[in-house]
Image (cartoon, helix red, strand yellow):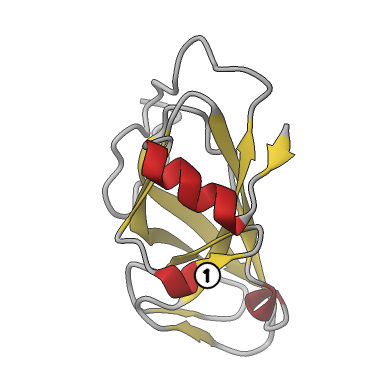
Amino acid sequence: MTVLSDKEILQHIELGEIEISPFERKCLNPAGYDLRSAIELTINPRKSMLVASLEKVQLGLSVMAYLYLRSSLTREGIIGGFAVVDPGFSGQLTFNFHNLGENVVRVEKSEPIVQIVFHKLGGVADKGYAGKYQESVGIVESKRMR
């Protein structure tokens, strides 16, 4: 499994193996893409909040992704809970942010918050993601017990 470079991400977008909508060229990094906040939010000290990505992400069967919190937010005391983005996933992504710091942290709508790093699988997956969060729109609460 290899990490896709910016050039390879663009190639995979052209091939339809990766879709990011809306796509903003300035969010493309050498080894990933900065997903932005769909909403303005305020995270008080010692509180958690769910936030959705502005972008809808869709992956083909030969690509998966890992999610990483932007370091600027970690420097302010934010930690995040993230999952793997499986091949075949389609939808907006929901993240859990927790403020461990002493100060209120504000995030503007459309501010970069999470980097998604795409990996090329060694082969094509037999089946794509078909879980409860497929085609997610906006902030999606846990569906674990449903």
Please state the total of marks drawn on the protein image.
1
The image shows residue 1, relative to residue 65, as above or below, that is above
Q: Residue 30 at what x, y percent from top left? A: 65, 63
Residue furthest to the top: 126
Query: Which residue is more in the foreground, 26 or 53?
Result: 26
Residue at horizontal 54%, vertical 26%?
62
Residue furthest to the bottom: 103
Q: Can residue 104 be seen? A: yes
Q: In this view, does 79 lie to the left or right of 144?
A: right
Q: How many residues crowd around disc 1 within 10 Å: few (fewer than 14), some, or many (20 or more)?
A: many
The image shows residue 108, relative to residue 129, as above or below, that is below
Residue at horizontal 58%, vertical 61%?
115
Quick one: quadrant of the N terminus? top right
Residue type of the residue flagged with mark 1: Ile
Q: Can residue 58 be seen? A: no
Q: Residue 104 at what x, y percent from top left? A: 55, 88
Give the labeled residue for mark 1.
113
Query: Which residue is more in the foreground, 52 or 36?
Result: 36
The image shows residue 38, relative to residue 125, as above or below, that is below
Q: In this view, does 3 lie to the left or right of 33?
A: right
Quick one: quadrant of the C terminus? top left
Q: Residue 53 at what x, y percent from top left? A: 40, 59
- Which corner quadrant of the image does residue 139 belong to? bottom left
Q: Residue 78 at what x, y percent from top left? A: 64, 72
For numbered disc 1, what is the local secondary structure?
Answer: strand
Residue at horizontal 38%, vertical 68%?
24
